[in-house]
Amino acid sequence: MAALNSELSSTKELSESAADAPGGPPLSESDVVQPSPFALFSLMVGISLAAFLVALDRTIVANAIPHITDEFKSPDDAGWYGSAATCAFQPTYGRVFAHFDVRWSFITALFLFELGSLVCGVAPSSDVLIVGRAIAGVGCAGVFAGCLVIVAMTTPLAVRPAYMGAVGSVFGIGAVCGPLLGGVLTSKATWRWCFYINLPVGAVTAILLLVFFHPERAGRGQEGSFVRRILRLDLIGNFILIVTVVMLLLVLQWGGIDYGWGSSRVVGLLVAAGLGFLAFGLWQKKKGAEALTPLWIMANRAVTASIGEMFFLSGALLVHTYYLPYWFQAVRGRTPVQSGVDLVPYVATNFAFSMIAGIAVNKTGFFAAPAILGPVVACVGCGLLTTLRVDTSTATWAGFEVLTAAGMGMAMQQPIIAVQAVLEPAVVSIGNAIVLFAQGLSGAIFVSVANNVLRNQLAQSLKASGIPNASAILGAGATDVQDLVPQEYTAQLVRAYNLALSKVFIMSIPFCGIALLFAFGLPWINLKKKQNERETAEH
């Protein structure tokens, strides 16, 4: 009880600090606008579609990249077709939603995402495609953050976990279905449909938001001129962060692949990225309450724990999302579409347990339990996935997927719930954005690290086995890789790929373990009691 009182006292002090800050007075729980059941259902449909698109956009391009580089003769540009760097814009949107009208801020982000997708779809060259991805990325960063803010503005704290679980489940489905849908669209139509698909779905989301979402904030948090509110976004801090993240991603993309880790280019970028993060931290301290990532929010134990759990749990999830299809295709000889079907146990279980956890938190009021239990279950599943072999039965690998995804599903949304529980509504958007930044940065870092592990281990195995055509194998994807060697080497190649991928899957074990350590830092707050306390304080 003493620990809980201490946590509540700390939260109160942080809220008072926010109230005194130039960011405007905090919104209270009574400012939550609860729509009618039909309007809320329509809003949830629109938000879920938006979350699905954001997740889909992050992974759908994977199967299309070989076709894009073939058409534009631009293999060196492949690294720029992803959207990993968009995580750098997440903190900015946290302040945008705090200081500007949420509905129109969300619609603007969605418009940028749609515009960028259209540019990509009609792109006549690689350069235009990269510009389109950049535009879409800026919008994409705000769309999912906006989804969480809208849920927070339209649902009471005590019942919010179920809605968060639903949105998070749809996001997870989109992330895993991306490669499957990308493969289908690319093989049956054209890679351009990987971008065109965003347009009609995004339009439906925009219509639903415009019709059913009418926040009544009475201008709170939006005082001051438009220019003054723009200045509150900490554009200098965001510029430093964007440049720093781009340098870090270049290090991860080039290191050990295009350039040696000891090369002047990689070392120089790594040092510059380190200095960039240092400069960003000093600037945030100087800006105080108007910082992009205010230190008074970061100092909250629950926020720090949420960032850590989300960072490492997302890393483990994305390692599976990207590299389980590799195992199905390279080791078991499945097509891209078939490998997508093989991921259905993972997707379905993730969705189911995210919903189950949300309902359980609704009933009990406590989010810390699934946040702790999830990494434990996922860690066991991750360990089992490292034992996959060429002759592993379908029932066995499907069971491993189910166990791993169950742990991921029950824990993944709890960091967001924790942030919303300990921060007052006025600064929830900033807290959400910081956690989502950690999620995006995690994917950018750990997927690149996993790619390095795969390539280096595969290169060693190919060399040790004396398999011919090693350079072509390393340069090719997992699809039809067995056709690149004479038949007498096929078994050795499959074993080499299996060994390399088992090393990749090992990475997810410590990720889940570290996520568990951070989960222990989450407070045992009862959401129902917390909401009652807020409502009592307001009256």
Image (cartoon, helix red, strand yellow):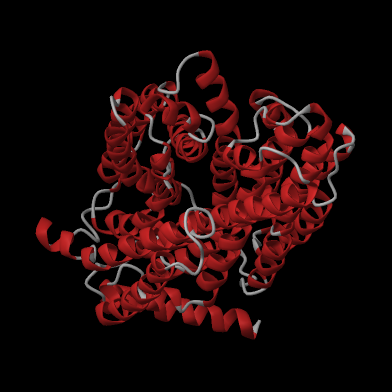
264 or 200: nearer the viewer: 264
Nearest the camera: 38 or 308? 308
Observer-nearest of 348 and 160: 348
Q: x%, y% of residue 401?
A: 77, 42
Q: Residue at x 70, y 24 (%)?
A: 338
Q: Position of residue 440 (x, y in %)?
A: 48, 54
Q: Residue 270's spot in the image, x, y percent?
A: 42, 70
Q: Residue furthest top?
A: 188
**Position above or below: 397 against 24:** above
Where, quadrant-wise, is the C terminus in this rendering?
Answer: bottom left
Classify residue 467 by image quadrant. top right
- Residue at the spot 74% in from the left edge and 55% down from the top edge: 503
Is residue 362 at all visible to an observer of this figure? no
Up-down: is 20 above or below 510? below
Direction from residue 468 to residue 276 in the image, left or right: left
Residue 404 in picture, x, y percent from top left: 76, 49
Q: Residue, x 23% and y 62% (percent of image)?
A: 233
Total tally of numbered discs in the picture = 0
Q: Is residue 19 visible?
A: yes
In the image, 373 versus 387, the foreground residue is 387
185 relative position to 499: left or right? left
Tell me the quarter of the picture where residue 39 sits: top left
- Which image quarter is the N terminus in? bottom right
- Residue 398: quarter of image: top right
Residue 251, compared with residue 451, is above or below; it is below
Q: In the rendered view, would you say 175 is above or below 294?
A: above
